[in-house]
Image (cartoon, grey):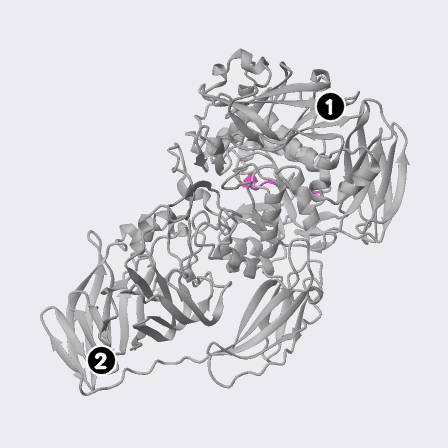
């Protein structure tokens, strides 16, 4: 059908819509408004003036708007036909197909035009309305990407900006009684060039649709300001008022956080402002989110607004809230669910907030668009700081061939200026009364031109009570004549640790520094959370950061015959272009089960941390910005010696004011021998709306005493036999027989107690299944041949010496095409008890990349799958990812040790082990060393983990795979962030390690 092509016109963004305003839902009486104010999402469903149009709509899908018959848009809603729930996305209901892209545009870059084959979904339903002389407004809280709307066969209007509310007055279109509505939604529009967010691309009416019934003259908009006195002992609540129709008198009353009426006032008709005063205010912050209720009555309607009294400002380059420095321990969050896609209910959002609170998160960046209008209000109720971001991202312009710098194809195009300003204004105007929002963000990764500068100027002028954020200002082009002085913070993504040090070592910046994205959490990661947190704790101007990102984005695609859930990501739907599994980069799985990386982050950002003083006392430091840690947290301790608990108890933390530090004597006894630790665990004393009392919030492990224990030497036995052939060395004792292959320098048979203790030859192993954070170094590793090295033995010597067999092999590991990766001598000393002391000495070619690992890989009988160890557990742990774990005694199994990442990769290693015992019904192995080592027990080979794209495709090895590693390179966050820190790379020029293996027989 023929319609005006507003969707290809930067000059026509909205037709027939109301001007943006603050989100609120009026009620029919003050009593009704107050009764619902504290309810879930403001209880808007309780208002007699609110009518939801959510539910089942008739739905027809077309390849383009041109294919939609004229009579479809004018016809009444059919009684039968295909249907779809609203809100939802049509890709989840059998239409179109899913597509995931990060940077790449899904359409040609040809603004403002979009493909002629532009899928169109036509939604229809009927509803009953009773205006009774009221004016009626139709609200769409989110439609992707644009839409035309008809009521009773008449075109009402058009709108875009997927993640913002579009409101139409439909009073003159509505009939008393039965009505029918038609909405035509297009997949793409000129706004698509500004909505290139890193996410699964989904279409349709994905947020709530409803009617509001308003009096002929009514309070149209209001803006609540809460200036505080300089000493924070009093506050004013100033409310700007605007009306539709005639100006009205307004009554206002303020209720305390506990529901007590504090004061009231009245503004005469025509007044543009009213004011109330509060003495000794209870100020809002994320740790104690105290909210007042402001009741406004006008024209027979009532509105109850939740108000937080707080002040945001910058002093000496530090972000202050209510005069106190605050630090963001945040996450970036998309609206995402594997079943409902971008259509997120309040219940789903609260599920996310609960998981965040359980993991010590206090801040959210709404990446990269405003959430539904009830979401920031939930954050205000539950206590989260927000960077509320506008619906703008155009990093696809970086793929455009042009002579300019990154993003310049978009930032220099002045046609985008009006759409950019429109999107920023809609974000600000809709959410301006939410105290949780401390910063407005202009958008994400879109360059910095005059359009963004003007949007920043407007935002600052309209709302000077908040700060303005925009990371992409770092792409400012000096020759474009722009200034960044209109921005209040300096924001970066993924800067290396050394760059942050250099920044604060240089001249002091007047702006707070925010890591708006950091420690990319893709797959097995992040591995550098502690390194960044140390900087955040050290520099007052470093305001904290927001992990990229909260959840893995995926589409639930069913289950395997065995019942395992299947999740799809980029490329699984036959789409082009796509960016693979780069959407699987969250701290939680799609079903919100936390990754081990979230446990890591939780402990890194714990609200209190401890250090041991020289006199044996413990110094505690609080990360709380407003609360006293000793009033919020209980603590218990235990002393362990060689992994065994020898003492335990509970204690009270010393008085710890916000950001305070104090030492205390716990009263523990320091053991006289062994490797000893003081373990301290912190628990919540109080219940909160999202967390129970008694919930652990973090732990510290303090080394009391170190003692390196050298494993006993293999026992001498004069009855040992040693025989040698051209290809093997055979060592036999009373209860064992070992065969070493001269061609590999490794054992090919290990039998003890008449049982084979390995099923395949032992390997000297330097490869690991690449993690997502290895994605950039993987090509270097593969070019160096690390995934296909073969041993070459140059010389083998075998002798019986003092009742022990000693075998030494000179060998190398190398792959075809390239030089040796390493050259080494491996020496085995075998005793009559079957123990094998392994000593590895050698050199690495430093021209090659750092090694993924260095160790031995054993293939054990399948039933040999239980492990007990003294090392870092219970979570997987690596040199740079071990703060969720602690040194202790733990037990696991091969299957239980596997971390089931949706894209298979290296997982399940345990760092810093003194020993590990792996056994089954018929025996096993005890591995121990004088220096800490890592081990990994798994039902999968590293080759299988490397080869498969999805976890449900994995096939178990017929053996149990045991890796005993002298060294494993760290995890880092290089999937999107900086390279792995030097200190976490395994790249020595020379190395020397030992390990002792002892057979365990249960016969």
Image coords of residue 990 (percent x, y): 30, 68
Image coords of residue 112 (percent x, y): 51, 22
Residue sitting at the far left? 726
Spatial separation of the CA atoms under disc 2 and disc 1: 90 Å
- According to the image, label 1 marks what residue? 136
State which tag comes first along the sequence, 2 or 1: 1
Image coords of residue 997 (percent x, y): 30, 75
Residue at 67%, 60% (x, y): give it. 624
Is 491 one of the magenta-colored residues? no
Quarter of the picture containing the C terminus is bottom left
Image coords of residue 343 (percent x, y): 56, 36
Q: Quadrant of residue 866?
A: bottom left
Q: Is residue 984 left or right of residue 240?
A: left
Magenta stretch, residue numbers: 466-474
Residue at 39%, 62% (x, y): give it. 909
Residue sitting at the far front? 79
Q: Is residue 748 left or right of residue 451?
A: left
Name the foreground residue: 307 vs 460. 307
Answer above or below: position of 258 versus 69: below
Answer above or below: position of 1001 versus 160: below
Residue at 61%, 72% (x, y): give it. 636
- According to the image, label 2 marks what residue? 735
Residue count near mark 2 (Cα–Cα under 10 Å), binned few <14, some 14–19, many ≥20: some
Name the foreground residue: 409 vs 755. 755
Residue 2 visible? The answer is no
Label 2, secondary structure: give it.
loop
Residue 76 visible? The answer is yes
Name the foreground residue: 155 vs 921. 921
């Amino acid at each position: 059908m023929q319609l005006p092509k507003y969707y290809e016109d930067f000059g026509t963004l909205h037709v027939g819509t109301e001007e943006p305003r603050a989100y609120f839902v009026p009620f029919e009486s003050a009593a009704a408004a107050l009764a619902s104010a504290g309810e879930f999402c403001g209880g808007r469903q309780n208002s007699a003036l609110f009518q939801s149009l959510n539910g089942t709509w008739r739905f027809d899908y077309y390849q383009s708007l041109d294919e939609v018959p004229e009579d479809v848009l004018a016809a009444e809603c059919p009684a039968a036909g295909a249907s779809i729930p609203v809100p939802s996305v049509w890709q989840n209901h059998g239409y179109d197909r899913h597509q995931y892209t990060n940077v790449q545009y899904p359409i040609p870059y040809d603004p403002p035009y979009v493909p002629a084959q532009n899928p169109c979904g036509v939604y229809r339903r009927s509803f009953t309305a009773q205006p009774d002389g009221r004016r009626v407004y139709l609200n769409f809280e989110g439609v992707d990407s644009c839409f035309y709307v008809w009521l009773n066969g008449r075109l009402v209007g058009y709108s875009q900006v997927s993640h913002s509310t579009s409101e139409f007055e439909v009073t003159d279109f509505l009939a008393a009684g039965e009505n029918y509505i038609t909405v035509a939604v297009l997949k793409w529009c000129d706004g698509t060039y500004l909505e290139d967010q890193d996410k699964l691309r989904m279409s349709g009416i994905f947020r709530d649709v409803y009617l509001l019934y308003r009096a002929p003259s009514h309070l149209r908009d209001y803006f609540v300001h809460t200036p505080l006195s300089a000493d924070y002992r009093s506050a004013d609540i100033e409310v700007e008022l605007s009306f539709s129709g005639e100006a009205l008198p307004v009554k206002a009353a303020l209720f305390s956080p506990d529901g007590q009426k504090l004061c009231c006032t009245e503004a005469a008709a025509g007044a543009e402002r009213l004011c109330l005063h509060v003495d000794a205010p209870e100020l809002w912050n994320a740790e104690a989110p105290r909210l007042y209720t402001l009741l406004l009555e006008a024209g027979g309607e009532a509105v109850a607004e939740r108000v937080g009294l707080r002040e945001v400002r910058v002093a000496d380059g530090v972000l202050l809230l209510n005069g106190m420095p605050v630090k963001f321990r945040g996450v970036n969050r998309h609206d995402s669910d594997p079943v409902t896609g971008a259509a997120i209910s309040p219940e789903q959002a609260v599920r996310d907030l609960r998981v965040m609170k359980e993991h010590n998160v206090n801040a959210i960046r709404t990446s990269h668009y405003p959430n539904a209008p009830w979401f920031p209000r939930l954050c205000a109720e539950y206590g989260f700081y927000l960077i509320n971001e506008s619906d703008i991202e155009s990093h696809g312009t970086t793929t455009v061939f042009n002579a300019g710098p990154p993003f310049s194809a978009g930032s220099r195009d002045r046609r985008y200026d009006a759409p950019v300003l429109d999107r920023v204004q809609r974000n600000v105007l809709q959410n301006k009364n939410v105290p949780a929002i401390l910063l407005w963000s202009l958008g994400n990764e879109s360059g910095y031109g005059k359009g963004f500068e003007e949007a920043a100027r407007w935002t600052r002028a309209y709302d000077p009570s908040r700060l303005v954020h925009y990371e992409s200002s770092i792409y400012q082009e000096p020759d474009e004549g722009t200034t960044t002085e209109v921005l209040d913070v300096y924001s970066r993504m993924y800067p290396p640790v050394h760059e942050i040090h250099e920044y604060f070592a240089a001249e002091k910046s007047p702006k707070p520094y925010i890591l708006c994205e950091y420690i990319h959490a893709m797959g097995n990661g992040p591995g550098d959370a502690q390194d960044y947190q140390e900087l955040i704790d050290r520099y007052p101007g470093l305001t904290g950061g927001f992990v990229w990102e909260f959840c893995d984005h995926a589409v639930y695609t069913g289950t395997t015959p065995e019942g395992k859930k299947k999740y799809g990501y980029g490329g699984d739907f036959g789409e082009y272009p796509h960016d693979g599994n780069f959407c699987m980069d969250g701290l939680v799985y799609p079903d919100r089960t936390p990754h081990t990386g979230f446990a890591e982050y939780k402990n890194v950002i714990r609200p209190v941390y401890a250090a041991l003083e020289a006199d044996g006392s413990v110094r505690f430091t609080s990360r709380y910005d407003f609360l006293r840690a000793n009033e919020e947290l209980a603590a218990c301790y235990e002393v362990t010696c060689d992994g065994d608990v020898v003492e335990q108890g509970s204690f009270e933390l010393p008085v710890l004011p916000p950001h305070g530090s104090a030492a205390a004597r716990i009263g523990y006894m320091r053991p006289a021998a062994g490797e000893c630790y003081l373990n301290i665990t912190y628990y919540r004393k109080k219940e909160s709306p999202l967390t129970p009392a008694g919930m652990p919030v973090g732990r510290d492990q303090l080394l009391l005493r170190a003692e390196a224990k050298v494993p006993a030497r293999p026992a001498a036995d004069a009855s040992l036999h040693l025989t040698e052939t051209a290809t093997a060395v055979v060592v036999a004792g009373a209860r064992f027989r070992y065969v070493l292959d001269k061609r590999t320098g490794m054992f090919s048979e290990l039998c003890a107690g008449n049982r084979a203790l390995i099923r395949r030859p032992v390997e000297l192993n330097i490869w690991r299944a690449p993690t997502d954070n290895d994605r950039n170094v993987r090509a270097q590793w593969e070019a160096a041949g690390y995934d296909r090295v073969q041993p070459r033995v140059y010389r083998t010597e075998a002798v019986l010496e003092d009742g022990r067999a000693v075998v030494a092999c000179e060998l190398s590991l190398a792959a075809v095409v390239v030089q040796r990766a390493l050259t080494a001598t491996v020496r085995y000393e075998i005793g009559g008890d079957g123990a094998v002391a392994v000593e590895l000495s050698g050199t690495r070619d430093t021209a090659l990349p750092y090694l993924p690992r260095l160790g031995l890989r054993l293939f054990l009988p399948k039933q040999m799958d239980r492990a007990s160890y003294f090392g870092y557990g219970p979570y997987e742990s690596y040199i740079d990812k071990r703060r969720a774990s602690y040194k202790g005694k733990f037990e696991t199994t091969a299957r239980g040790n596997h971390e089931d990442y949706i894209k298979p990769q290296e997982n399940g290693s345990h760092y810093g082990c003194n020993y590990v015992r792996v056994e089954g019904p018929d025996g096993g192995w005890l591995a121990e060393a004088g220096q800490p080592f890592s081990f990994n027990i798994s039902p999968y080979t590293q080759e299988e983990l490397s080869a498969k794209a999805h976890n449900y495709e994995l096939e178990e090895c017929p053996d149990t795979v045991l890796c005993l590693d002298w060294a494993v390179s760290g995890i880092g966050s290089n999937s999107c962030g900086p390279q792995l820190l030097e200190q976490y790379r395994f790249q020595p020029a020379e190395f020397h390690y030992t390990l002792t293996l002892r057979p365990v027989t249960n016969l």
